[in-house]
Image (tube, rainbow, N blue to C red):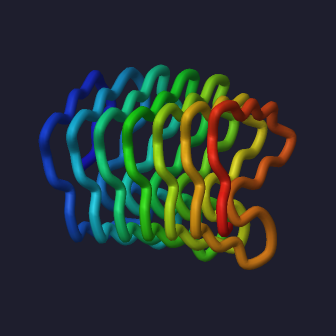
Amino acid sequence: AYSAGKMTIENSKIIGNKAAIGAGLAISQNNLIIRGTSFQQNVATVAGGGLAAYQIKNLSIEQSNLTKNTSLSGGGIWLSHVDTFQIARTVLSENTSSGGGGAGYAAFVLSLTVLQTTQTHNTATSGAGWHLVNTQASFDQSTFDHNQGAVLGGGLHGVDSQISISNSTFGQN
């Protein structure tokens, strides 16, 4: 699915899709709200196995699951040039990136907030939990466990980013 406008996705399943970018969903411009939705086993050859968002103002993901998605960059989620991204009460698990960001990859995101979210059993060359580039990020009440970064950052890898972490757990990454 591709959208260049305002969009809301609720209580849906996005499973087994393939594309170069955003196998499960690709969105650019405007706003997107995702609630109670599963992204599973989507495969992108370039970026965003589960979800790719670029040049977007606001993106919110709540009470959702991104599981077993695969991509070169951003196995679960890939973000580029996003104003505001918030993810809450969501599980990102068993996502794979052969590059950066098993669970998620974010570049040039003005405000990235991860709240009460679990990143577990994701794999990547760097930043198996999250790989951040030129991004201002906040992680609160979140868990990073059993993520495997082959070279850098099992749980988290940041480059030229401002990162705040509070009340969170990093274990066995």
Q: As rendered, which of 131 and 46 lies closer to the eye?
A: 131
Screen quadrant of the C terminus:
bottom right
Residue at x-position 20% and y-position 56%: 14
The percent position of residue 77, horizontal first and vertical second, equals 47, 51
Q: Is residue 1 above or below residue 136?
A: below
Q: Quadrant for residue 129, please give it.
A: bottom right
The percent position of residue 131, horizontal first and vertical second, equals 68, 53
In the image, 66: left or right of 81?
left
In the image, 109: left or right of 36?
right
Q: Is residue 30 above or below residue 94?
A: above
Q: As rendered, which of 156 and 84 lies closer to the eye?
A: 156
The percent position of residue 125, horizontal first and vertical second, equals 70, 73
In the image, 121: left or right of 3?
right
Q: Is residue 53 above or below residue 56?
A: below
- The residue lying furthest to the right in this view is 160
The percent position of residue 101, horizontal first and vertical second, equals 61, 59
Tally of numbered tags: 0
Q: Is residue 24 above or below residue 90?
A: below
Q: Quadrant for residue 7, please give it.
A: top left
Residue at x-position 22% and y-position 45%: 37
Residue at x-position 75% and y-position 45%: 133
Residue at x-position 46% and y-position 67%: 95
